[in-house]
Amino acid sequence: MPKTAHMTKILTTIGFDADDTLWHNERFFRLTQAHFSDLLADYCAPDHLSERMLAAERRNLGRYGYGVKGFVLSMIETAIEVTEERVPARIISELIAAGQDMLSYPIELLPHARTAVETLAQSHRILLITKGDLLDQERKLAQSGLGDLFDGVEIVSDKTPATYEAIFTHHGEGTSRALMVGNSMKSDVVPVVTAGGWGVYVPHGVTWEIEHAEPPNTSDRYHEIDDLGALPPLVDRIEQP
């Protein structure tokens, strides 16, 4: 669709995170981890199991990356550890099945997601920038009904200042004229602000512990909004200082 001329704009490109920004995701991980705790109840207390699982996830990020597959492999590894290699095959089978279920959950958009993307797509270059399993992220985007609204889709292994600089330079005029919105302070906000762009935090309520970070409160390019319904008005304020 036609865009307003970029030369008059402060922002030319807007990036959206996907999971727990545009659609629900983390709650499925929490439900599966609760099931994991039930399966291992005879071997390990829930709190201790959660600690061991989080340690496995941190340890495995460099090997498996983000997403369901790495999550399932970390559950299996943790189950082997806490049972001292005595975990029944039945439990391993149930963990694999739980992961397969996670890869088929229907997509449910978060409030105002469609309206925000549709509105901003009329005036700015719109990108989807997300981490996770390639096939799963492609599936979710296709089911979301939002795919045709994006000018570009980037599924990355990690989100760093260099990652954003490369993406926003390739698709736009660099990070200094870009804004990124997402529910992760660590991945969606801090690295963009560090790279000289605007970072907008939209809390989801349930955030993976690994994604926690301190907000860049000293930067005038950091903003927080309650939901995506507030994003188009915020962009208007940035465009008209």
Image: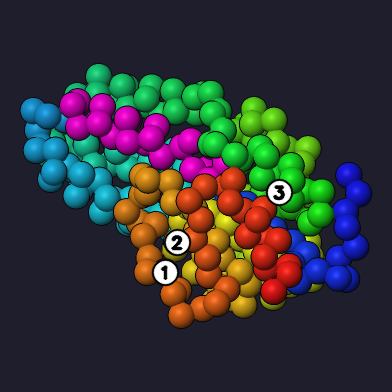
Q: Earlier in the sequence, mark 1 or mark 3?
A: 3
Q: Is residue 22 magenta?
A: yes
- Pick whichever of labels 1 and 2 is earlier in the sequence: 2
Drawn side of residue 60 relative to residue 51, left or right: right
User: What residue is drawn where x is 25% and y is 31%?
Assistant: 34
Gap between marks 1 and 3 measured at Cα: 26 Å
Residue type at numbered disc 2: Met
List the residue tagged with mark 2. Answer: 185
Q: Are marks 1 and 2 in contact (CB under 8 Å)?
A: yes
Spatial CA distance of label 3 from label 2 is: 21 Å
Q: Residue at x 44, y 63 (%)?
A: 186
Q: Amino acid at mark 3?
A: Val
Q: Main secondary structure of the magenta part?
A: helix
Residue 89 place in picture, x, y as percent: 25, 23
Residue picked out by circle 1: 215
Question: What is the span of residues highlighted in magenta in the rendered image?
Answer: 18-39
Residue 96 placement: quadrant? top left
Colour scheme in the image? rainbow
Q: Residues within 10 Å of mark 1 (few under 14, many from 20)?
A: some
Q: Which residue is mark 3?
A: 153
